[in-house]
Amino acid sequence: MPRRRSLRSWFRPPGLAVAAVAGLALFTGPAAADATSDVAERYVALGDSFTSGPLVPNQTGEPLLCLRSDHNYPHLAAEALGAGEFRDVSCGGATTEDMTEPQSLPLGSENAPQFDALTEDTTLVTLGIGGNDIGFADIVVTCGTLSVTDPFGNPCERRFTEQGDELRQRIKDTAPKLAAVLQGIKERAPQAKIVVVGYLQVLPESKGCWPRVPMAAGDVPYIDGVQQDLNGMLAEQAAAHGAAYLDVLERGHDVCAARSDRWVEGIFPTNPAAPVHPNADGMAAVADRLTALLGEDTDVR
């Protein structure tokens, strides 16, 4: 049976769900080389909202509440690579469990298990997952609440490290889940090249930028470090299971960056995107790196 989720648990950004604090306490490029064309012949994109691109124009596909953009990085890369067949089954709020189980969405809609899109002749699979498994939405609700009484300290770090580092433990607990997902892809799509896509940088290394991120200044480096460790775990699991890892964490494009440099929007987006999610420039940056990794150096912006 599909899991029933509240609206809050469904719409949880995989990087940092600051929106929860506020509301709740491709363009065709040059022809690809033969090897690139072969790998993209039948492309399936799996993932959560950092893949689907909520509110990035234009929203497309079914179910509508997965909030997929036709300018998310899978669509842009598929176009640049000249993919023969392309399926984007990413969905906002997805966890590793939603690869094999139906994902319940608001208003009674449902996204089929994402693995249903895989076939024996799939040639390329991109996977962006794991952030929701470690529960960043609840983390940031806690951090935002604690910051009210200690805006310059590190109350959230203290809260989550009272008895060991709880957040790092969540990352460790997610590692075998990701391993199972990668093994499941290999079993269902044995010919496919698998690319695990990391998460774009959400926070700067220090200080922050209230009110874009309502978080105590001392907690910004801690949560940024947690995201780096999450990406590190994704890279390790990719290597252990014969998959490629796409590192997209580049400094200077976080929620605190200038509007023209920003790849992830803050709690009050100034570019079309959901709060604390990639905007169109962020999606294009990921697509650029993905096409370069696969052998076609194409600027999709």
Image (cartoon, helix red, strand yellow):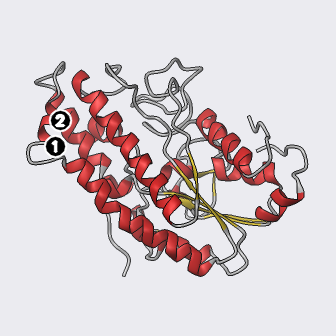
Residue denoted by label 2: 156
Q: Is residue 75 visible?
A: yes
Q: Position of residue 252 (x, y in %)?
A: 51, 23
Residue toward you, 32 or 62: 32
Residue toward you, 237 or 223: 237
Residue denoted by label 1: 160
Residue at 12% x, 40% y: name it: 159
Q: Are marks 2 and 1 in contact (CB under 8 Å)?
A: yes
Is 280 located above or below residue 240 in the figure? above
Q: Amino acid at mark 1?
A: Phe
Is 39 located above or below residue 74 in the figure? below
Distance CA(mark 2)–CA(mark 1): 6 Å
User: Which quadrant of the structure image shows residue 94?
Assistant: bottom left
Secondary structure, mark 1, is: helix
Residue at 82% x, 64% y: name it: 38
Q: Mark number for residue 48?
A: none
